């Protein structure tokens, strides 16, 4: 049976080659696709885990001051996103919902919390500037 490339200067199509060779090519492609999906799912897991930790370190009153949902709400939503990304495959519907929730937190809630906190992250609270001395800001001896 002639292949799709028969008659073009001796080029053989996949129908005219060894059937075992085409199976090997298919196996390599399936493995490559599986590796790509594995790394994407690891990336989504890390992304949602970082958002969950960030939501956990902010104070409850910052959420109220930013006029966003409460801290327990975001911890539950992002915790479910982490669990779904951990236990389910990327090809199902729930990890996509977890990704949307994580993106909403990172794009909308996190900047509002940073603005309410004075532009400082939750770990910098109580620390001064890097140029502060024991008695206040150091201005270079002026």
Image: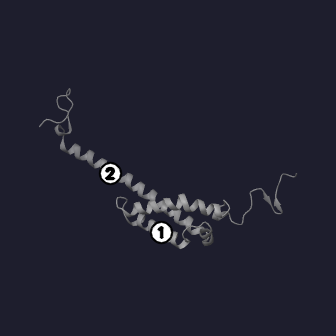
Q: Residue furthest right?
A: 142
Q: Residue at x 45, y 58 (%)?
A: 44
Q: Residue at x 68, y 65 (%)?
A: 125
Residue 114's place in the image compared with 22, above or below, is: below
Drawn side of residue 54 relative to residue 45, left or right: right
Could you tell me residue 75's position as x and y percent?
51, 70
Q: Residue at x 37, y 53 (%)?
A: 35
Could you tell me residue 5's position as x and y percent?
20, 33
| The disc label shown at residue 139, or none | none
Drawn side of residue 114 relative to residue 99, left or right: right
Q: Are marks 1 and 2 in contact (CB under 8 Å)?
A: no
Q: Residue furthest top?
A: 9
First in sequence, mark 1 or 2: give its number: 2
Drawn side of residue 132 relative to residue 73, left or right: right
Q: Residue furthest front?
A: 67
**Residue matched to label 2:** 31
Q: Secondary structure at mark 2?
A: helix
| The disc label shown at residue 77, or none | 1
Q: Secondary structure at mark 1?
A: helix
Residue count near mark 1 (Cα–Cα under 10 Å), binned few <14, some 14–19, many ≥20? some
Could you tell me residue 120's position as x and y percent?
66, 60
For the N terminus, the image quarter is top left
Drawn side of residue 40 relative to residue 56, left or right: left
Residue count near mark 2 (Cα–Cα under 10 Å), binned few <14, some 14–19, many ≥20? few
Nearest to the eye among marks 1 and 2: give it.
1
Could you tell me residue 79's position as x and y percent?
48, 69
């Amino acid at each position: 049976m002639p292949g799709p490339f028969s008659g073009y200067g001796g080029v053989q199509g996949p129908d005219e080659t060894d059937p075992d060779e085409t199976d090997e090519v298919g196996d390599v492609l399936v493995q490559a696709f599986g590796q790509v999906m594995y790394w994407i799912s690891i990336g989504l897991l890390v992304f949602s885990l970082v958002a969950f930790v960030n939501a956990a370190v902010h104070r409850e009153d910052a959420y109220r001051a930013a006029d966003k949902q409460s801290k327990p709400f975001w911890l539950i939503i992002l915790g479910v996103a982490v669990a779904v990304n951990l236990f389910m495959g990327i090809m199902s519907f729930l990890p996509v919902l977890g990704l949307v929730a994580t993106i909403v937190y990172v794009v909308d809630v996190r900047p509002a919390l940073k603005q309410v906190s004075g532009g400082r992250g939750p770990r910098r609270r109580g620390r001064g500037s890097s140029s502060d001395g024991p008695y206040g800001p150091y201005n270079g001896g002026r």
